[in-house]
Image (cartoon, rainbow, N blue to C red):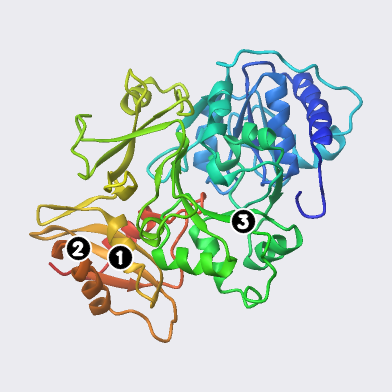
Amino acid sequence: MHGGERLNYDEWLDQSLRVAAVFADRGAKPGDIILIGIESSIDFAICFAAAQLLGAIASGVNTRLGRREIDSIVERSEAALIILEDGAAVPAASPQVVRRSELAALRRRPVKATPHVGDPHDLAVIIWTSGTTGLPKGACFTHDNLRNAVRTAGPVAGPFARKLSSVPFAHAGFMSKGWEQVAFGMTLVISPTPWSADAMLRLLVDERINIAGAVPTQWAKLLGHPGLASADLAHVEVGIVATAPAAPELIEQVSQALGAPLIVRYSMTECPSMTGTRIGDSPEVQYRTVGRAQDGVELKMVDDDRNDVPHGTVGRIAVRSAAVTIGYWRDPERTAEALTPDGWLITGDYGRFDADGNVILAGRANEMYIRGGYNVYPIEVERIIGELPSVAAVAVVGTPAPVIGEVGIAFAVPADPSNPPSLENVRSKVLAELADYKAPDQLVLLDALPLTAMMKVDKQALKQRAAALPSTRG
């Protein structure tokens, strides 16, 4: 369901076969890549299914990506066809183009394709990374990968559930979940673009949503909606927060507002389901960890030489499951860097296990900074600062400084602009719970944290701002 349009499963199959026939007429064949560069919509879902039915490889292109990023995806994918919004510029070296305005007619054309019968190990989708650390990489998944991902769903899917999706369809949250939706016979309700708290609340109520997914920024904005307290949300069974760490206070407040648990999921493009908290977990687990490994998922922590580290020690997170990417599109060097011969994906994240096997994130490898010879992982600092009632959102980055090497800069959004947190407040909170060298050296107040195309905090933009600050402590 999207806006006023609804599509049942019979209609989805019928219209997707008709569009698949058009894709074939325009030169797409089994094994080719079809790029889908339109907003999250029923049109997107039909193009996705059409590619699969044709035996092609579906690949979403986030419409918020920049021209350079999109050109890179088109060039490296050597796609046979790309679907674009009407006003979108045609990328350089573009393949065949289908404009979104054409789809209404194509969905009702008289000719239907014959579904392609392939192999479970054929490529099904390519999901491109957000590109915050360089040009996007294409994580490849087979049909068997997607089938195996169903068993990792946990409470974020259920028979005939009504699920609200608030993430872009080019994201792994949709691209890797095609089998999941069909396996459970779920109704997927698509948030409108651009997203708004008003629309989210309306959909939660009117569509009687059971499973509600959103990123931390969206949940925070929903909390500020004046109609939330009086809304009938009795049908909501579980909320999901994913794609970025959520402050403990945010999780608690959303759970209370929904009258249902808000579970935390941890995943990434290369492995769309890794860990999650469980319904009934203690507040300490819900607010300070990202839960335990999902069914069918193995986790361990390793050092930079890929050796296991002792339990409870911070290491690089490694994951193995039948749903992990088989590698990056036409990039054997990066594939070898990420995947071991025995199937472990070495992620760019650091973390540690608590005594019960819950994962506590420490930060990304490219976000860690070294202050006076000591490693500082921003995520654990952000989690502590995020517990301050005066802080609505926070991000910490490192920036070069004389003598001491690097110092930490905290960028915070005040919960109440008339009573913002001070550097002393922030440092005192961190010093009370973490090592002294982890306390930020400067505090910068913002109206909002900058976001990437995937609605994650744009740490690269904040690093640029930090580098331009006039002075630092240390």
Q: Is residue 448 above or below residue 103?
A: below
Which residue occupies the foreground of this view, 191 or 282? 282
Image mark for residue 434: 2
Q: Is residue 171 visible?
A: no
- Which label lies toward us, 2 or 3? 3
Where's the C terminus, which quadrant? bottom left
Disc 3 to disc 1, how far (Cα)? 28 Å
Choose the circle earlier in sequence order: 1 or 2.
1
Residue 442 % position (x, y): 24, 70
Residue receiving disc 3:
237
Instruction: Give the amino acid type for the residue marked by disc 3 in the picture.
Output: Glu
- The numbered dot on residue 473 is none
Please tell me which residue is depicted at 33% across the width and 62% down the height of the picture: 383
- For badge 1, the amino acid type reads Ile
Contact between marks 2 and 3 (CB within 8 A): the answer is no
Q: In the rendered structure, are the residues bearing label 1 and label 2 in contact, judged by CB atoms less than 8 Å apart?
A: yes
First reached walking from the N terminus: tag 3 or tag 1: 3
Whole-percent x, y for residue 381 in the image: 27, 61
154 lies above or below 53: below
Query: Is the C-beta separation of discs 3 and 1 under 8 Å?
Result: no
Q: Is residue 30 left or right of residue 22?
A: left
Pinpoint residue 79: horizontal percent, then vertical percent. Answer: 61, 25
Q: Residues within 10 Å of mark 3 (few under 14, many from 20)?
A: some
Q: Residue at x 45, y 29 (%)?
A: 324
On residue 384, the disc is: 1
Tell us which disc is closer to us: 3 or 1. 3
Q: Is residue 460 left or right of residue 372?
A: right
In what element is the residue under mark 1?
helix
Sequence-first tag of 2 and 3? 3
Residue at the outermost left position: 403
The residue type indicated by label 2 comes to: Leu
| Image quadrant assignment for residue 42 | top right
